[in-house]
Image (cartoon, rainbow, N blue to C red):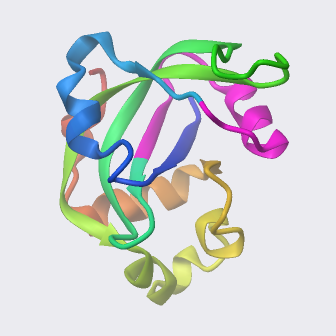
């Protein structure tokens, strides 16, 4: 299993929008960065990701699950990029801010700090565990959902 982080501007598509989709989930389209697209190509059904509100809030606010692997993005007229489908599975009770992540020395190498503009990025298992702890998320909140 792998872990990921999906960044979204809450005014365009926020955590509540994602939750409103229920078990049907939603496709993660519009990615136009080759590195982010390559990350999505590596995603497998059952992988988990953090849902991150960018711009003003700059916080991890939810956990999602990959429910459909990489396939062509219908919003890309040139057919170069793809998308995955994700489903909301858990709130992060105490949203974890970018400032809190930067302040935690154990997270000094997380891609969110090193390359904050990348919209889809991997998260190491140890980083995942630390952020879940910071956010008040227990494994029972997200595992096997």
Give yes or no for residue 34 being in the magenta stretch. yes
Locate residue 129, reporting x and y percent.
41, 56
Residue 89 can be seen in this image? no
Question: Which image quarter is the C terminus in?
Answer: top left
Residue 7 pos. (x, y %): 50, 51
Q: Identify the residue shown where x is 18% and y is 27%.
A: 20
Taking the spot 81% from the left edge, 44% from the top edge, the residue there is: 35
Q: Residue at x 74, y 39 (%)?
A: 32
Q: How many marks?
A: 0
- Front-lying residue, 139 or 34: 34
Q: Which image quarter is the N terminus in?
A: top right
Q: Quadrant of residue 97?
A: bottom left
Image position of 99 with respect to 143: above or below: below
Q: Quadrant of residue 55?
A: bottom left
- Residue at (66%, 64%) from the top-left corner? 117
Query: Quarter-wise, where is residue 61 in the image?
Result: bottom left
Q: Nearer the viewer, residue 83 or 69?
A: 83
Q: Which residues are magenta?
A: 30-50
Q: State the image coordinates of residue 11 (x, y, percent, origin top left).
A: 33, 53
- Left or right of 53? Residue 145 is left
Left-right relation of 42 to 26:
right
Residue 136 appears in the rendering: yes
């Amino acid at each position: 299993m792998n872990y990921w982080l999906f960044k979204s501007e809450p005014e365009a598509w926020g955590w509540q929008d994602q939750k409103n989709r229920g078990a049907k989930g939603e496709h993660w389209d519009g990615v136009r960065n080759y590195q982010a697209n390559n990350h999505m190509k590596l995603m497998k059904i059952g992988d988990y990701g953090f849902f991150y509100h960018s711009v003003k809030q700059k916080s991890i606010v939810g956990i999602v699950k990959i429910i459909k692997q990489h396939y062509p993005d219908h919003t890309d007229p040139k057919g170069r990029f793809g998308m995955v489908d994700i489903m909301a599975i858990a709130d992060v009770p105490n949203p974890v801010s970018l400032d809190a992540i930067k302040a935690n020395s154990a997270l000094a190498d997380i891609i969110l700090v090193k390359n904050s503009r990348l919209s889809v990025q991997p998260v190491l298992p140890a980083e995942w565990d630390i952020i879940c702890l910071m956010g008040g998320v227990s494994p029972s909140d997200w595992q096997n959902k």
